[in-house]
Amino acid sequence: MKRVTLGGSDVAVSEICLGTMTFGNQTPKAEGHAQIDRALDAGITFLDTAEMYPVNPVRRETIGLTETILGTWLARTGNRDRVEIATKITGPSQMVRNGAPYDGAIIAGAIDGSLKRLQTDHIDLYQLHWPVRGSYAFRQNWTYDPSKQSKQQTLDHMADVLGALDAAKKAGKIRAVGLSNESAWGLTQWCAVADHIGAPRMAAIQNEYSLLYRLFDTDGAEVAVNENVTLLSYSPLAAGLLSGKYAGGAMPEGSRAAVDKAGGGLGNLGGRKTPQGIAATEAYRKLAADHGWDAIHMAIAWQLTRPFKVVPIIGATRTDQLDHLIAGLGKPLPDDLRKAIDRMHKQYPLPY
């Protein structure tokens, strides 16, 4: 499998990343270990997690469990030198540290906590899960209001956080730093502040990106190219929507939507499962079939044709689902299909 260097760092990873956010909830420990084994056999060496995982739903009693499961895999196999591990510090308004926003002092302790759970002495990519000033990710774009933000307060916060990340990097605890659910302006400022104080530049930004959700294509892509930042795209299958499992109003037992609904949620895949989203999914699935492609394989292969560096994060609750994803890797997307996708995007520009 091809290797990708994250931004301007010295961290090289596989061009596909294995997401682990269901490990410890929908995916039991043994199956999580099996998935990592299977991914490694396929050449996927890059693993992404977070201190707040598992999700769907996030529960106080399970926070940190996914990192712990990865740690037990590392301890059992001794394969730390064969993988690259990314994790994240939780943002505000979530169930870690009673929702307190992170700062430089908090980051130092959070890194040590992740290292302990992961049973390792270093993290290859340490990410900020959410901006403390707010974000338009997860459908918040429809009502996003940045008017209450203080630019100077934001810049001071960035300098404080970057100082802590710089200290952790110099101590050998982390190798590179990144963002998540961040905007184009935010990414630009993180880079500028890092340059100003001599701290590590952001090497990656983990944002949602799929055939159905392409907000990154304009301002985000321009900043990423010019600042040399790699996109780590989460939900490349639109939380399973592009698999077709929810066609016709279906709600398969054990699926992400079903588990969310059973836990008191809306079961709408974080706002993705809309009439427009279903219609766009059906159109893309038909397009794939007309070209002799599996829609899941098309969705991943398309990401690797983008005019900026991108590493798709694939995830599965079960190993057989992961096997299906892996079966389509390495298959180049034909130019005629890529052009057809471009035309279809104009019909369904933002379906949720």
Image (spheres, rainbow, N blue to C red):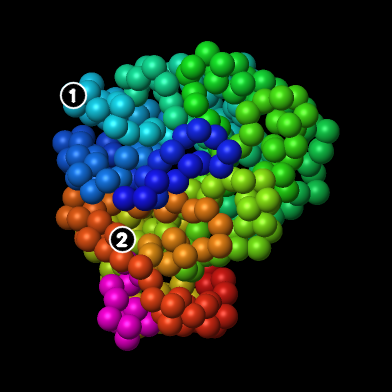
Relative to 17, residue 63 above or below = above
**On screen, residue 292 above or below 69:** below
Q: Which mark is residue 76?
A: 1
Q: CA distance from mark 2 to mark 1?
A: 30 Å
Mark 1 residue type: Arg
Q: Which mark is residue 243?
A: none
Which SS type dominates the magenta stretch? helix
Q: Residue 94 appears at what percent x and percent y?
A: 52, 36
**x and y percentages locating residue 261 in the rendered image:** 35, 55
Of 37 and 183, which appears nearest the observer? 37
Name the mark nearer the viewer: 2 or 1: 2
Q: In this figure, which residue is indicated by the disc labeled 2?
A: 330
N-terminal of the pair, mark 2 or mark 1, is: 1
Q: Residues within 10 Å of mark 2 (few under 14, many from 20)?
A: few
From the viewer's perspective, tell me whether residue 84 is left or right of residue 32: right
Most distant residue in the bottom direction: 290
The quadrant where residue 295 appears: bottom left
Label 2 residue SS:
loop
From where the camera sits, is residue 27 visible?
no
Instruction: Give residue 336's position: percent from left, percent from top.
Output: 43, 82
295 displayed left or right of 137: left
Instruction: Determine if the magenta segment contains residue 76.
Output: no
Q: Which residues are magenta?
A: 287-298
Question: Residue 254: x, y in percent?
Answer: 23, 55
